Image (tube, grey):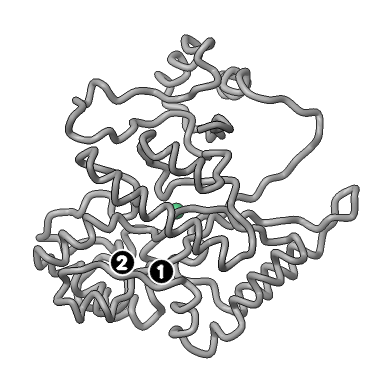
C-alpha cells in the first residue's frame, strides 16, 4: 500500500495521458566496456574481480547476432496502430581511440566514432552499423544521445597518467571502467561522463557535447531531441549548449545532486526540477523516501 501511494504521489506532477504506452529506454548502445570474452578472462585471471558488477560481467558491444535476435522480438508484436515495438537505445557516439592515446604516451585523449570500433571488432560485428540504420528506418530502434563517450575523460586520463595498474591493464585489453585490484584505490564513478570537480571543466564538456551531438546526427541522420546523461549526472551549466545542439528533453532520475564544481559547497547541491517547483514540498517529502523514479525535464525552447 505504501508503495502504491508513493508511486502515485511521485507521478502527481507532470503530463498525463490516457494512452497506454510502453517505453523501452536501453542504456549504453555503442559504448565499449569489456571488449570481449577473452578480455574478460584475461582481466579476471590477472586478479581483477570481474564478477563484482554485472557491467564487468556482461557489458559489451552488441554484435550482429544480438541485433537479429532483438529485431526478431521487436517485430514479433504490434500495437493497435500496427506499429512494432520500438527500442530507444541511449547511444554513445564515440569510444576512446586506444591506439592514439597510447601513441601520445597517455598525454592526450583521442576518440573514434563507435562505427570505427565496430569495424575493428571483427566479423561478428560486420554489418552492425547497417542494422542500426535498418532499425531506425523501420522505426524499431530509434537512438537518443547518451553522451559522446561513456567515460569520464578527465578521470580516465588522470588514472592513466597516474599509472593506475588496473586501468592500464583494462586499457591494454581495450576495456574501460572495470573493478580495481583489491589493493588499489577505487576510481570514483568512471562512467560519469559529465561529472565535474571544477566548474571550468564544463568548457571542455560543452565542446564534447557539440562534437558528440554532431557525430550522432552524422551517423544516424537526425538530431537527438533527448539527452540522457551517462550515469544520470550532468551539470545545469550545460543546458544552453544542449539546447543549442537540438536537445529538447533531458531524461534523469527524479532527484540527484548536480555537480557544480568546487566553487560551490556540497550543501548547495540541490534537488532539481524546473517545471514542478510549485509542488516542491511534495517532492521533498518523496525525496526523503529515497525514490528513484525517472523523469524528463523539458528545456525552454529559447535556451
Ligand atoms: Zn549509460
Q: Is mark 1 within 8 Å of ligand 1?
A: no
- Find disc 1 in the rendering and name its residue: 32
- Residue at disc 2, secondary structure: loop
Q: Position of residue 257 (x, y in %)?
A: 34, 31
Label 2 belongs to which residue? 176
Res. 234 image quadrant = top left
Q: Compared to 79, does 175 lie above or below?
A: below
Quadrant of residue 12 within the rendered picture = top right
Q: In this view, does 7 lie above or below 118?
A: above
Q: Which of marks 1 and 2 is nearer the N terminus?
A: 1
Q: Counting other residues with Cα less than 10 Å from the Cα at mark 1, is it few (<14), some (14-19), or many (20 or more)?
A: many
Quarter containing the N terminus: top right
Name which residue lies at 90% across and 48% down: 80
Q: CA–CA distance between discs 1 and 2?
A: 7 Å
For this orientation, the residue located farthest to the bottom is 123
Please give left or right for residue 192 compared with residue 67 in the image. Answer: left
Q: In this view, does 204 lie to the left or right of 144?
A: left
Q: Residues within 10 Å of mark 2 (few under 14, many from 20)?
A: many
Residue 41 horizontal side relative to residue 78, left or right? left
Mark 1 in CB contact with mark 2 (< 8 angstroms) = yes
Q: Position of residue 189 (x, y in %)?
A: 28, 50
**118 with respect to 198 (left or right):** right
| Residue 16 horizontal/vertical position (percent) | 72, 25
* Residue at 52%, 39% in the rendered image: 250
Q: What element carries label 1?
A: loop
Query: Residue 221 appears at what percent x and percent y?
Result: 64, 64
The residue closer to the viewer here, 88 or 275, is: 275
How many numbered callouts?
Answer: 2
Amino acid at each position: 500500500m505504501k508503495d502504491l501511494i508513493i508511486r502515485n504521489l511521485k507521478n502527481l506532477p507532470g503530463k498525463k495521458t490516457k494512452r497506454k504506452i510502453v517505453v523501452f529506454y536501453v542504456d549504453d548502445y555503442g559504448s565499449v566496456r569489456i571488449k570481449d570474452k577473452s578480455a574478460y578472462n584475461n582481466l579476471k585471471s590477472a586478479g581483477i574481480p570481474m564478477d563484482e558488477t554485472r557491467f564487468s560481467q556482461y557489458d559489451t558491444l552488441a554484435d550482429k547476432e544480438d541485433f537479429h535476435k532483438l529485431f526478431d522480438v521487436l517485430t514479433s508484436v504490434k500495437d493497435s496502430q500496427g506499429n512494432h515495438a520500438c527500442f530507444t537505445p541511449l547511444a554513445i557516439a564515440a569510444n576512446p581511440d586506444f591506439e592514439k592515446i597510447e601513441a601520445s604516451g597517455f598525454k592526450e585523449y583521442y576518440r573514434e566514432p563507435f562505427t570505427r570500433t565496430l569495424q575493428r571488432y571483427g566479423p561478428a560485428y560486420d554489418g552492425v552499423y547497417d542494422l542500426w540504420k535498418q532499425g531506425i528506418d523501420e522505426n524499431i530502434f530509434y537512438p537518443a544521445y547518451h553522451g559522446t563517450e561513456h567515460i569520464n575523460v578527465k578521470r580516465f586520463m588522470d588514472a592513466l597518467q597516474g599509472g593506475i595498474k588496473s586501468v592500464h591493464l583494462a586499457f591494454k585489453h581495450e576495456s574501460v571502467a572495470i573493478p580495481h585490484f583489491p589493493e588499489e584505490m577505487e576510481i570514483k564513478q568512471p562512467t560519469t561522463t559529465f561529472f565535474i570537480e571544477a566548474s571550468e571543466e564544463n568548457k571542455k564538456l560543452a565542446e564534447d557535447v557539440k562534437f558528440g551531438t554532431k557525430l550522432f546526427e552524422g551517423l544516424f541522420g537526425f538530431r537527438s531531441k533527448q539527452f540522457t546523461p551517462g550515469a544520470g549526472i550532468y551539470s545545469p551549466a550545460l543546458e544552453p549548449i544542449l539546447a543549442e545542439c537540438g536537445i529538447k528533453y533531458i531524461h534523469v532520475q527524479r532527484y540527484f545532486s548536480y555537480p557544480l564544481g568546487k566553487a560551490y559547497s556540497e550543501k548547495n547541491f540541490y534537488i532539481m526540477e524546473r517545471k514542478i517547483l510549485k509542488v516542491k514540498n511534495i517532492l521533498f517529502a518523496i525525496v526523503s523516501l529515497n525514490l528513484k523514479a525517472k523523469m524528463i525535464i523539458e528545456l525552454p525552447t529559447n535556451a
